[in-house]
Image (spheres, grey):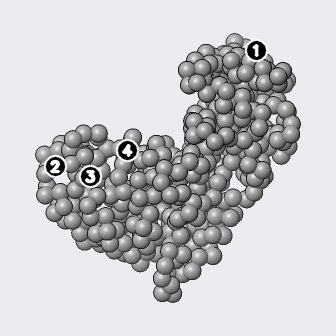
Amino acid sequence: MERNPSPATDLVGAYRACSPQPLPPDHAWYVDLGPAREGDLRGVMERRFRSKPSPVAGVAGQEAWPKVLFVGMRGTGKSTELNALAARLRDAFEVVRIEVDDRLNATDFDLSELLLAIAVEVERHFREVVNRPLDEAYLGAIQSWFTTVTHEEVRERLAVVQAGMDRDLPPAAGFLGSVLGMLKVSSAEREKVVSALRRFPGDLVKLCNRLLDEAGGRLEPERELLIMLDNLDRYEPAVVDRALGGGADHIHGLRVSMVLTPPVDLLLRPVGPPLSSVYATEVMHVPAIRRPSEAPGTLSDPGAALLRELLARRIDLARVFEDGVVDELLRFSGGHPRLLLDLVREAILRTGGDRVGLDAVDAAVRAQLTLLRDQVNLSGLVPLLAEVHRTRQLGHDQRYLRLLFNRWVFKHDGHDWYAVNPLVLRVPEVADAIARHDGA
């Protein structure tokens, strides 16, 4: 990605500039939305890691290797903020960022698979990024343990996966990479292997710790290892709870600092004991573009100004948008950064001239509503949406969590208030439910 692109001056360039992807912290498009979230959350997390006791000094216990949950609604910029945090900690930590859904099965994973992925990615990082390869014996010990525990019952399946692997990899790295490739496939073989692995999580933690100790020893004396497990929020809460909740003792037993990103609804409605009771937890809200007391459609700073700047870094606003269009896009986004970028792209696709007008925004909104209306009505959650709009809070029904998961409701800033997605407010049945209550 080009680090200092000029703002786009035409529709094609604007469309490309609004592609949603995590940004490096020194990128020209990066805007710190912290003031609209009411707090320097990244600064809090940085201080949390810098203030921890040093494991080198012989300090025992969990505080020496903190495990911090970083929670927020999908599409609000968590990955970009993790990149920024990694940059601020670069002097003290070597950061290994793992996109969990890229390494593990797309719908389900076990703690043992997560531990294997950590070991494989740490080895790869030190070989390819740090240029200080780890002793092959440490990953080799994990390979030996794996073949012993599983009795090599998956040899044929692994052979198929290994056929497509890079032959230049160290043997153990190639083998365990093949294992993870095989486990990504939902199959009888995967269940067989996972059933065998989950019987001995403590042994795997010990082997991983030896590898992590070896990795830490390759760094400068004043630096440590930090692992960021990103995209955990793309999994169902029950899946993440089994690994982070049921496996909390094993996660805390890893001799490495970590950031983990579970789904926000798991924190609000725990499957088991609350994760926030066993992990330090930081919550990132959707930027607020109005105050709780203000009506939907109101634009207030700093949120509105920051999101306008987010677009201005990418697009020459005067050359791409007609008057009033940017404010209209901000209103319909509700402050959600990903939704704002998506709306810009959809409006561009519906523009016949050289600049985006209000008619194109209206067409983009109507296109969104075509499917959204059916989804909302079939969910049976219209009364709950009307209640959130009235109270600015979630009720006691666990179905309210689906509103968050579907991004039909946003949680804003330190006041802990909720707002219905402005697009959802345009669904006729939701608008009618709100009007009936207001007229009662």
Of helix, strand and loop, which one carries label 3? helix
Q: CA distance from mark 1 to mark 4?
A: 43 Å
- Pointer 2 and pointer 3: residues touching (CB < 8 Å)? no
Q: Which mark is residue 264?
A: none
**Number of callouts:** 4
Label 2: state its secondary structure.
loop
The outermost residue toward the bottom is 57
Could you say which quadrant of the image residue 422 lies in? top right
The local crowd at label 2, few if under 14, some if 14 to 19, many if 20 or more residues have their Cα within 10 Å, is: some
- Judging by the rendered image, the residue that carries numbered circle 4 is 108
Q: Earlier in the sequence, mark 3 or mark 1?
A: 3
Please rate how many residues cluster around mark 3, counting C-alpha atoms within 10 Å: few if below 14, some from 14 to 19, many from 20.
some
Residue 194: numbered disc: 3
User: From the viewer's perspective, is the residue at label 2 or at label 4 nearer?
Assistant: 4
Q: Residue at x 82, y 22 (%)?
A: 440
Q: Is residue 225 above or below residue 352?
A: below
Q: Nearer the viewer, mark 1 or mark 2?
A: 2
Q: Secondary structure at mark 1?
A: helix
Residue 118, horizontal then vertical, whole percent: 39, 60
Mark-to-mark CA distance, 1 and 2: 58 Å
In this image, 402 relative to 252: left or right? Answer: right
On screen, residue 34 above or below 329: below
Q: Which mark is residue 359?
A: 1
* Residue type at the position of mark 2: Val
Residue identified by numbered label 2: 154
Name the residue at 56% across, 25% down. 379
Q: Residue at x 56, y 63 (%)?
A: 277
> Which mark is first along the chain, 2 or 1?
2
Nearer the viewer's eye, disc 1 or disc 4?
4
Real-space CA distance between mark 2 and mark 3, rounded to the nearest whole angstrom: 11 Å
Q: Amino acid at mark 4?
A: Asp
